[in-house]
């Protein structure tokens, strides 16, 4: 199943909706679209406006691939669901957003190998057919935080064991 999400932005995202609708026509695979406040709606996909976070996460965990706009919450959810992710940033030039800040986030996750960024809608069918593997390099921030705290505590314990006075705070 392909899960597509456009987020909560009040502006339409017709480029993405129309392209995934064409993908749905060309495949037997189920395509589900979270259309949010978009006025452009798919004709060949299942779609809904909004669902609870728990329902959305359940859908994402079932997806073969997640196609999403470049909202930070949406990207983090796709990564938390551990699904291959394709990021299509909303663009100011197409009146899909007020700024191009989504380009920066999409580029950042692409550069880290956490998702594939698609700017040209003509590349989306191939990206969906051959999505990137879920990245081995991705570790949620809380895991890095826990590891950093443990490392710090280990260093403090080592310093104390060596008789080095440690002052915290």
Image (cartoon, rainbow, N blue to C red):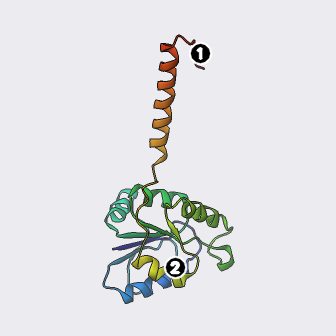
Residue 39: tell me if it is visible: no
Asked whether 91 or 97 is in front, the reply is 91
Residue 98 placement, left or right of 25: right
Quadrant placement of the N terminus: bottom left
The crowding category of the residue bearing disc 2, from other C-alpha atoms within 10 Å (few below 14, some 14 to 19, many at least 20), is: many
Asked whether 36 or 106 is in front, the reply is 106
Asked whether 64 or 39 is in front, the reply is 64
C-alpha gap between disc 2 and disc 1: 55 Å
Residue, disc 1: 167
Q: Is mark 2 on a helix, strand or loop?
A: helix
Marks 2 and 1 close (CB-CB < 8 Å): no
The crowding category of the residue bearing disc 1, from other C-alpha atoms within 10 Å (few below 14, some 14 to 19, many at least 20), is: few
Residue 71 on image: x %, y %: 55, 62
Please identify the quarter of the rendering in which residue 111 is found.
bottom right
* Residue lying at the far front of the rendered structure: 162
**Disc count in the image?**
2
Residue shown at the point (40%, 79%) measured from the top left: 129
Q: Which disc, if any, is residue 16?
A: 2
Residue shown at the point (46%, 36%) measured from the top left: 147
Residue 91 on image: x %, y %: 64, 73
Residue 28: tell me if it is visible: yes
Residue 30 placement, left or right of 127: left
Please identify the quarter of the rendering in which residue 78 is found.
bottom left
Residue shown at the point (51%, 81%) measured from the top left: 123
Q: What element carries label 1?
A: loop
């Amino acid at each position: 199943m392909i899960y597509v999400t456009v987020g909560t932005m009040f502006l339409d995202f017709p480029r993405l909706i129309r392209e995934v609708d064409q993908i749905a026509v060309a495949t037997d695979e189920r395509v589900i679209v979270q259309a949010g406040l978009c006025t452009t709606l798919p004709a060949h996909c299942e779609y809904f406006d909004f669902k609870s976070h728990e329902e959305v996460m359940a859908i994402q965990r079932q997806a073969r691939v997640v196609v999403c706009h470049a909202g930070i919450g949406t990207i983090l959810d796709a990564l938390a669901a551990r699904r291959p992710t394709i990021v299509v940033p909303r663009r100011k030039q197409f009146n899909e957003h007020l700024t191009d800040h989504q380009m920066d986030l999409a580029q950042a996750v692409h550069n880290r190998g956490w998702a594939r960024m698609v700017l040209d809608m003509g590349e989306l069918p191939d990206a969906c057919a051959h999505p990137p593997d879920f990245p081995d390099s991705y570790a949620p921030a809380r895991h890095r935080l826990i590891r950093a705290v443990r490392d710090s505590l280990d260093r403090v314990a080592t310093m104390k064991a060596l008789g080095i006075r440690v002052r915290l705070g």
